[in-house]
Image (cartoon, helix red, strand yellow):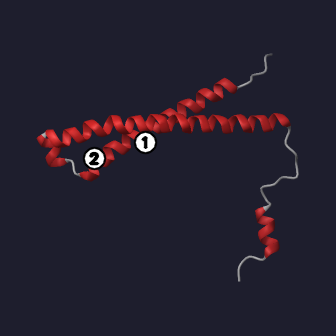
Amino acid sequence: MGIPSEMRDLFANRSKSLMISSPIEDEKILRSKQCTQEGVRAGAKVAAIACVATSIPTLVAVRKIPWAKANLNYTAQALIISAASIAAYFITADKTILECARRNAHYKSP
């Protein structure tokens, strides 16, 4: 049983086109990959900083403030810290990718 090898090869090579891309298209693809990598790198840096910046006050509050001690269990603490880190990552990555795309945009002058 399974997929015959001819069918498997047909589906595997489906992404390869018969058309050859131009050097300009290759350059655009390369720039977009670089922008994405730059955004991921910047987002990871800011997410790490946000994680530290939110974990310290959260853990101190749970130890010192009576309301937080009574109402914030481990899951709530993890949710607060991870929500801030995730938000920081996506906001920074989005801004970095858009800024890089603007920088690389080439408009034809009329």
Indicate the position of residue 96 as horizontal and vertical percent values. 56, 30
Which residue is at 59% across, 26% downward? 99
Which residue is at 59% across, 34% downward? 38
| Label 1 sits on residue | 86
Which residue is at 80% across, 61% downward? 13
Whichever of callouts 2 and 1 sits on the residue coming sooner in the sequence is 2
Label 1: state its secondary structure. Answer: helix
Residue that extends furthest to the bottom in the rendered view of this protein: 1
Residue type at mark 2: give it.
Answer: Gln
Left or right placement of residue 25 versus residue 67 in this view: right
The relative height of residue 104 versus residue 47 in the rendered view (above or below) is: above
Residue type at mark 1: give it.
Answer: Ile
Indicate the position of residue 55 as horizontal and vertical percent values. 30, 40
Towards the viewer: 101 or 61: 61
Residue that extends furthest to the top in the rendered view of this protein: 110
Residue 85 placement: quadrant: top left
Residues tagged 2 and 1 counted as in contact (Cβ below 8 A): no
Indicate the position of residue 51 as horizontal and vertical percent values. 37, 39
Q: What is the number of the mark on residue 77?
A: 2
Q: Quadrant of the C terminus?
A: top right
Left or right placement of residue 48 versus residue 27 in this view: left
Q: Quadrant of the N terminus?
A: bottom right
Which residue is at 78% across, 35% downward? 27
Q: Residues within 10 Å of mark 1 (few under 14, many from 20)?
A: some
Gap in angstroms between the C-alphas marked 2 and 1: 14 Å
Q: Residues within 10 Å of mark 2 (few under 14, many from 20)?
A: some
